[in-house]
């Protein structure tokens, strides 16, 4: 990872200069479906939306699937350069050449997207995760609409804190959004406040996701 | 809801971006003076002799030391002159942050037998907020004064929050993000007969307003060099005679035992020179910047639909322009500006280390979307109308491009509501 002109994954993810690929997809975004008010949704058979304006990141994704291949993929993104570049790169990856089979696309990971981008700063990894989630939602939506319910993949999550219903997925997301210690995590999710006996399990997950996404400190 | 269709040119977004970015001569338009300033050449000239020629340690017995000590004393008394205090009341530090830390921890630890209650505003710089948070962990009580839509604290609310055991009130003089001035003199007056000590972080305000400590009624005051065209890595803490603090840095007894470490003579000389220059022709500079600021603000708001000013419209720093543009995100916006050679900053979460959006914008009651779309331009000594016109030309184009990429079309009326913003549209 890391390319000419930048140091994207510096220690503790502090530096955040962008790679040439990220800049390319930001200043020259591919497959954009411009926000002109009227969108002809009939050309697409799968739709996925993630994030919200309050979060500072929101993506809308439209896919067209023919013979189980993604032949077209369009998007709109509200967010930073990493978010825009991630959605653009992801849309290219799934629709380039003859297009990915839906099952292939389902297996696409944020790491795949980041590799094509030459890397993202640690603090921006969640942008590629968001792009990946939007894709999964869009494909699931296609499956649902085309009566292929059995092919839908739901991200199973395990409830860690029965008092607040905080799941392991919630903890993962919080870590991706910058919570790297217990205090910040608890401030974000209010997890294990009323039942401190689950703190060891929470910390185990916290450290797992921190080292997964941010490497060893 | 705005109907964009007829406003959009027939060119694709990519073509618009190419048109915007290609073929322009590279500019250098620096509009982030609230972050830091370039050193004034006259300051650079003033500090030069003290690196290699007059490099002595001011504590030295010999002539070389004496020369350094004289420079140090001279700098100190000049700074004291600007603040209207005695030289003994000026402590030189390594930064504004250090001065803030000295003030907050210093007072708290010295006077905790008199009480453990501290009051700060909701929009303090992290250099004040985080020491206060740390003190809270150590058993102090911290009250946070809310601010109104413009970012001002209420003196009445302060009076109501004061307790018998309050020992420190810290309110920054002018906010670095939204520019709003606080009623420091009024607060000083309100605290006159109370035991609590009054500290203000005046880093952004130096060179703009008079900072005579008796007029302000403060017991402690922070300044730093990097905001006034002086060196980074130097600041001061004004400490009123009779007020004591527990030091942070122990060592060789410098600064009356309050801040150990061989004095950074060149930078201290630089700081004094920068402060001299800032106060020289101050009224003229303020007038010039205010005109430029108002011109830029009015034009931005006029040329960009769904935009609004953050902070007080008039009672704000003369160089501060902070606007929220709905539907787009600040980091992406900053990157476009950067590509064109324009330097500004944003209150968006994406650019902060903690991934939290500007707590200042949120504290004024605006919803998160407004923080994510906020842009801060802070003008300076070298800013010209031509530079502003260039920015005014490209900014609406950048906004249009990002709006075409963004799926949002937020309702502007929701942010006009005076209440503590909870966005209702979802």
Image: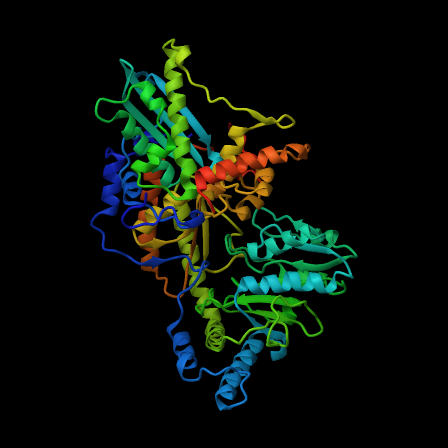
Looking at the rendering, which quadrant does residue A109 occupy? top left
Residue at 20% across, 50% down: B23
Is residue A177 in view from this perspective?
A: no
Which is nearer the eye, B368 or A20? A20
Compared to residue B136, the image places residue B244 above or below, namely below
* Residue at x 59% of width, y 62% of height: B100
* Corner quadrant of residue A2: top left
As drawn, the residue found furthest toward the top would be: A147
In this orientation, which residue lies closer to the viewer: B299 or B426?
B426
Q: Position of residue B34 (x, y in %)?
A: 46, 59
User: Which quarter shows the N terminus of chain B?
Assistant: top left
Left or right of B86 on screen, residue A209: left
Measured as percent of width and height from the top left, residue B292 is found at 40, 59
Classify B324 as above or below B271. above
Q: Residue B240: x, y in percent?
A: 67, 72
On the picture, is A170 further left or further right than A60? Answer: right
Picture layout, residue A61 above or below residue B235 = above
Residue A28 lies left or right of residue B189; in this view the side is left
Q: Nearer the viewer, residue B180 or B64?
A: B64
Asked whether B81 or B237 is in front, the reply is: B237
Residue A96 horizontal/vertical position (percent): 24, 27
- The colour scheme used to paint the residues is rainbow
Q: Residue furthest bottom?
A: B63
Labels in figure, total: 0
The answer to whether residue B322 is visible is: yes
């Amino acid at each position: 990872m890391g390319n000419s002109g930048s140091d994207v994954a510096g220690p503790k993810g502090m530096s955040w200069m962008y790679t040439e690929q990220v800049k390319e997809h930001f200043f020259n975004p591919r497959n954009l479906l411009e926000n002109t008010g009227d969108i002809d949704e009939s050309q697409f058979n799968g739709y996925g939306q993630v994030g919200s304006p309050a979060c500072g990141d929101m993506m809308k994704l439209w896919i067209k699937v023919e013979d189980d291949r993604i032949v077209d993929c369009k998007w709109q993104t509200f967010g930073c350069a990493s978010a825009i570049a991630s959605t653009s790169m992801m849309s290219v990856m799934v629709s380039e050449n003859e297009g990915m089979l839906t099952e292939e696309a389902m297996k696409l990971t944020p790491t795949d997207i980041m590799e094509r981008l030459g890397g993202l700063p640690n603090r921006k990894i969640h942008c590629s995760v968001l792009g990946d989630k939007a894709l999964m939602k869009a494909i699931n939506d296609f499956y649902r609409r085309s009566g292929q319910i059995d092919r839908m993949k739901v991200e199973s999550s395990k409830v860690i804190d029965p008092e607040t219903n905080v799941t392991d997925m919630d903890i993962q997301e919080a870590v991706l959004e910058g919570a790297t210690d217990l205090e910040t995590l608890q401030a974000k999710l209010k997890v294990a406040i009323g039942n401190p006996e689950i703190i060891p399990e929470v910390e185990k997950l916290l450290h797992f996701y921190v080292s997964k996404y941010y490497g060893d400190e | 809801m705005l109907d964009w269709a007829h406003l959009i040119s027939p060119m694709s977004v990519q073509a618009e971006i190419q048109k915007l970015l290609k073929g322009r001569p590279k500019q250098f338009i620096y509009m982030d003076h609230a972050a830091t300033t370039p050193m004034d050449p006259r300051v650079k000239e003033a500090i030069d002799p003290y690196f290699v020629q007059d490099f002595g340690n001011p504590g030295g017995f010999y002539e070389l030391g004496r020369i350094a000590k004289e420079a140090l004393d001279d700098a100190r008394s000049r700074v004291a002159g600007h603040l209207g205090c005695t030289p003994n009341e000026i402590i030189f530090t390594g930064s504004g942050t250090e001065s803030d830390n000295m003030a907050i921890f210093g007072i708290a630890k010295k006077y905790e037998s008199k009480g453990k209650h501290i009051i700060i505003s909701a929009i303090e710089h992290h250099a004040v907020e985080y020491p206060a948070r740390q003190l809270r962990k150590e058993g102090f009580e911290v009250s946070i004064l809310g601010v109104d839509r413009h970012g001002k604290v209420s003196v009445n609310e302060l009076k109501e929050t004061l307790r018998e055991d309050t020992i420190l009130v810290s309110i920054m003089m002018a906010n670095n993000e939204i520019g709003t001035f606080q009623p420091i003199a009024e607060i000083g007056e309100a605290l006159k007969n109370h035991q609590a000590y009054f500290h203000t972080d005046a880093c952004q305000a130096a060179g703009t307003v008079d900072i005579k400590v008796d007029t302000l009624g403060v017991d402690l005051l922070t300044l730093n060099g990097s905001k006034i065209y002086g060196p980074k890595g130097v600041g001061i803490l004004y400490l009123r005679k009779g007020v004591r603090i527990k030091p942070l840095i122990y060592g060789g007894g410098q600064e009356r035992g309050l801040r150990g470490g061989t004095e950074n003579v060149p930078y201290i000389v630089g700081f004094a020179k920068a402060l001299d220059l800032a106060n020289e022709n101050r009224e003229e500079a303020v007038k010039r910047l205010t005109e430029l600021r108002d011109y830029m603000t009015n034009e931005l708001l006029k040329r960009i639909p769904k935009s609004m000013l953050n902070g007080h419209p008039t009672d704000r720093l003369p160089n501060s322009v902070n606007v929220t543009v709905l539907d787009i995100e600040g980091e992406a916006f900053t990157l476009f500006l950067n590509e064109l050679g324009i330097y500004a900053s944003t209150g968006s979460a994406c650019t902060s280390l903690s991934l939290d959006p500007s707590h200042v914008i949120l504290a004024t009651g605006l919803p998160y979307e407004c923080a994510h779309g906020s842009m801060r331009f802070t003008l300076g000594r070298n800013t010209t109308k031509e530079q502003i016109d260039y920015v005014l030309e490209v900014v609406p184009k950048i906004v249009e491009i990002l709006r075409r990429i963004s799926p949002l079309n937020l309702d502007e009326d929701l942010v006009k509501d005076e209440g503590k913003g909870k966005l209702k549209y979802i």
